[in-house]
Amino acid sequence: MSQAVETTKPSYSAYYDRRMLRILLLGAISGFPWVLIGAALSLWLKEDDISRSTIGWASLIFSVYAVNFLWAPLIDRVHIPWLADRVGQRKAWILCLQLIILISLLLWSTLSPKENLALIVAVGLAIAISSASQDITIDALRIEQVGRHESAAMAAGAAVAVVGWWTGFKLGGFLSLILAEALQNQGYEHYWQISFQLLAVLIVLMNVLLLLIPEASWHERRRAQAHDQEAIGNKLPGDNAVLAWLASTIIAPFVSFFRKNGVSIALAILAFIFLFKLGEAFVGRMSIIFYKEVGFSKTDIAVYSKGLGWIVTVVFTLLGGWFAVRQGVFRALMLAGIAMAATNLMFSVMAWVSEPSVLLFAAAVLIDDITASIATVIFVTFISLLVDRTYTATQYALLASLGTAGRTVVAASSGALVDSLDGDWGLFFVLTALMVIPSLIFLWSIRTRFGEMGTEHQSNVAATA
């Protein structure tokens, strides 16, 4: 028992590091755009009488998060003139992409869904592309805040980054819904458009705070990248600079992943990553539409789903990392998958009761937040353990994008699924609960590999004590 306490203690002490505040901010900057193209856009379209199927298909804009690894090498290498020399390469990219999000938000404030639906979705796509692109450099800047051998601080930073993401997502959603409802109650016709203008202020504030985050010199990293490319190029016949660049950034990480795990286990791991949070994604795409249809107000949604949900998410995200260490990666993921499925069944009960129950609503939402936050931290821990440190950025982007693909591309059909069930929300949530089964089958098939990873992770944690 004392040994367990000793091995987990460094993870908690690392939370008091002031660098965690920087990582918290980076996470919030990453999570906030999901509010705009998720809850805010969905409810805005719903209240302008846009169909559920259309809203569901519009969420395809999230699919760009699944392919952002395709342009990750460009963001990692391209130097933004003038700005990078003054604020750093990572922050220069974030500031430029945040500017696009800000302009897009202000453009939304001039549009009407009934008259400009295609343009609104196109602007939402611009926000999604900018957000997915900034995530590449936000993850890199987050990692670079912690020393290479500070494993306890790195683990704490991963949990804090998730907390920051949920902070941007939950509190951003809380503000957007509260603002829209308050403006609607005061008689403003274009209440969503005005709320977008007010949310733009929050983006400006976050970017001012971003400038306070220090960034290590990007010149050293650029020289190292050029050195690796040259080394590969020397092994190729003739002058093959382009081929050397492609090999050093794309092909080598794939080869490393399959060599390290073996083909069969590697494919099972990839299938698990793709499928694990699919059911949760289906629920997430349609949850706010469901809440609205069963009779809950925007204030109810804001208080229980966004406000209280954020508090629960923060607490259980921090506990999620500790839970993964105590239970082991395999067991923690298995339990998290079962818990997510069981939570979806609570939403079925909500759909089948005759009158909307605020108590049941609050319980279902908060339990869903608990399971989702714990599952997310364990999932991030799992992907982090898979990554070959030689290709950390590329492999992390590839694996994270694969997980996002299942939650974006496939889950875009969520609205069509509800419509095909004639609006039977209870049956819809039952089906989403069953979606976790294939991923758990793949998880079981690679349980031996998980045991090895868990042992390695425990050894690394113990070594830092």
Image: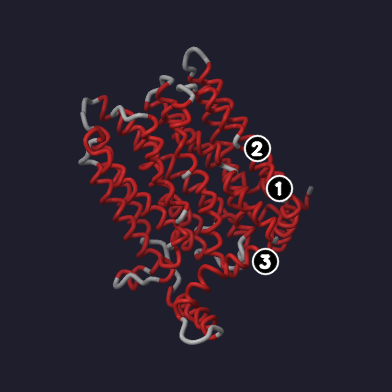
Q: Is residue 370 left or right of residue 324?
A: left
Q: Is residue 162 left or right of residue 303?
A: right
Q: Rate crowding at label 3 as few (under 14), some (14 to 19) or many (20 or more) other CA atoms within 10 Å.
A: few
Q: Secondary structure at mark 2?
A: helix
**Sooner in the amino-acid sequence: mark 3 or mark 2:** 3
In the orientation shown, which residue stands out farthest toward the top?
Answer: 354
3 and 2 marks in contact (CB < 8 Å):
no
Q: Quadrant of residue 427?
A: top right
- Quadrant assignment, res 148: bottom right
What is the crowding at mark 1: few (fewer than 14 residues within 10 Å), some, or many (at least 20)? Answer: many
Which is nearer the N-term, disc 2 or disc 1? Answer: 1
Amino acid type, residue under disc 3 in the picture? Arg
The residue wearing badge 3 is: 259
Identify residue type, mark 2: Ile
User: Against 327, is 94 above or below?
Assistant: below
Quadrant location of the C terminus?
A: bottom right
**Residue toward you, 119 or 72:** 119
Q: Which residue is mark 1?
A: 330
Q: x%, y% of residue 103?
A: 25, 51
Position of 283 compared to 336: left or right?
A: left
Residue 42 image position (x, y, % from top left): 37, 35
Mark 3 and mark 1: span between their CA atoms?
A: 21 Å
Question: Who's the residue at 22% across and 39% down the image?
Answer: 111
Could you tell which of marks 3 and 1 lies nearer the N-terminus?
3
* SS assignment at label 1: helix
Which residue is located at x 56 percent, y 42 percent?
A: 277
Rendering coords of residue 369 (x, y %): 54, 36
Name which residue lies at 36% across and 63% down: 93
Q: CA distance from mark 3 to mark 2?
A: 28 Å
**Callout 1, which amino acid?**
Phe
Residue under circle 2?
437
Say what secondary structure mark 3 lies in: helix
